[in-house]
């Protein structure tokens, strides 16, 4: 998974929108204590930086050292480059002791994981019964009807052959992803819960966002430039027709959240 984002780490850092405060406030309200959080697949540390304002300590891990180079350096965040698969001994040595973590977060990444193995590790590190796991993905972007029609054609036709099959879980808003955890307090299901985020972008910033896609990188490796001149012109025409250079681009965040309950005892 890390290889998909290695070559466009800078574009990923610059192009991806920040997650809304409401998302982290909601998650934090479901965790009983705020001592230690583990942000898995942290990338450039977007989620870790927000968690650092809530939790005493944050461990942020990624399999890409290049991605971690763009993460913000914060006093209560420890970044760790990890192999794609960790043994339980490596988990205890490099991440945390058994039943010591309050929250595990995975932002726009859990669909890449070996879920049975990963969930076993999550259940091992989370405090029982109230340790929380929160995994979310983003869909969009949305600008206006005319621009969105151009984008959807680009996404569903031009880029589609280059998406990994795991991307379908994102398109499904994580509704069908395996998520074997108990509902958090106050709910009878684990989601997905929807949040909205907005970012003011220029057209060039929007192109930077598109270049941060794994599908864009895969296409380039096959000698295909998805943002051809004619495609860029079509985007430009739809973007500039109202005369406004910068636009509010909307994304939707889809959150699955649950607690470990007594599941950890079976691991």
Image: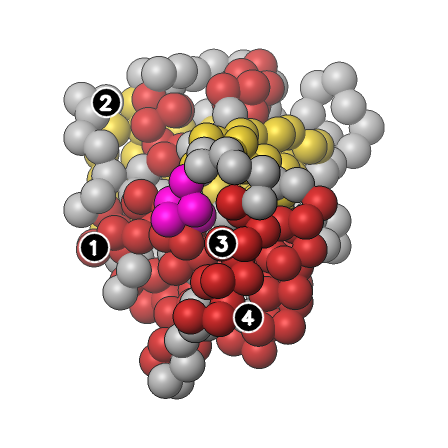
Q: Residue 41: x percent and y percent?
A: 39, 49
Q: Is residue 28 above or below residue 43?
A: above
Q: Quadrant of the N terminus?
A: bottom left
Q: Quadrant of residue 30?
A: top right
> Colour scheme of this structure image?
secondary structure
**Residue 12 spot, x, y in % from top left:** 34, 50
Near-viewer residue (106 or 180): 106
Q: 10 Å neighbourhood of mark 1: few (<14), some, or many (≥20)?
A: some
N-terminal of the pair, mark 2 or mark 3, is 2
Residue 243 percent coordinates (x, y): 52, 37
Which residue is denoted by mark 1 in the rendering? 65
Indicate which disc, 4 or 2, sits on the residue closer to the N terminus.
2
For disc 2, the marked residue is 76
Q: Nearer the viewer, mark 3 or mark 4?
A: 3
Is there CB contact under 8 Å for labels 1 and 2? no
- Assign a secondary structure to mark 3: helix
Viewer-nearest of labels 1 and 2? 1
- Circle 2 sits in a helix, a strand or a loop, which is it? loop
Q: Residue at x 58, y 38 (%)?
A: 242
Q: Residue at x 50, y 67 (%)?
A: 231
- Could you say which disc has been placed on residue 159 in the image? 4
Estimate the spatial distance between the alpha carbons at disc 3 and disc 4, rounded to whole Å.
Answer: 18 Å
Q: Give the mark nearest the N terminus, 1 or 3.
A: 1
Which span is picked out in magenta?
A: 202-206
Q: CA distance from mark 1 to mark 2?
A: 19 Å
Q: Is residue 122 left or right of residue 187?
A: left
In 3D space, how far apart are the residues under numbered discs 4 and 2 (Cα atoms)?
Answer: 39 Å
Q: Secondary structure at mark 4?
A: loop
Mark 4 vs mark 1, CA separation in Å: 27 Å
């Amino acid at each position: 998974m890390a290889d998909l984002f290695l070559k466009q780490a800078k574009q990923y850092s610059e192009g991806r929108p920040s997650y809304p405060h409401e998302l982290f406030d909601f998650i934090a309200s479901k965790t009983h204590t705020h001592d230690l959080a583990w942000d898995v697949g942290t990338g450039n540390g977007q989620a870790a930086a927000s968690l650092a304002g809530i939790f005493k300590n944050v461990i942020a891990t990624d399999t890409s050292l290049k991605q971690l180079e763009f993460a913000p350096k914060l006093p209560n965040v420890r970044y760790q480059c990890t192999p794609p698969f960790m043994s339980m001994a490596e988990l205890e040595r490099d991440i945390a002791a058994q039943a010591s973590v309050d929250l595990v977060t995975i932002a726009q990444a859990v669909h890449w994981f070996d879920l049975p193995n990963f969930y076993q590790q999550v259940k091992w590190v989370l405090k029982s019964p109230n340790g929380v796991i929160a995994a979310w993905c983003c869909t969009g972007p949305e600008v206006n009807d005319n621009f969105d029609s151009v984008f959807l054609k680009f996404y569903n036709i031009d880029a589609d052959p280059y998406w990994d099959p795991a991307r379908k879980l994102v398109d499904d808003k994580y509704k069908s992803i395996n998520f074997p955890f108990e509902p958090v307090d106050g709910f009878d299901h684990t989601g997905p819960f929807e949040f909205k985020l907005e970012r003011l972008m220029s057209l060039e910033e929007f192109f930077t966002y598109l270049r941060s896609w794994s599908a864009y990188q895969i296409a380039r490796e096959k000698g295909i430039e998805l943002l051809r001149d004619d495609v860029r012109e079509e985007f430009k025409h739809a973007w500039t027709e109202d005369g406004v250079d910068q636009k509010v681009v909307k994304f939707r965040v889809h959150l699955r959240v649950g607690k470990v309950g007594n599941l950890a005892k079976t691991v």
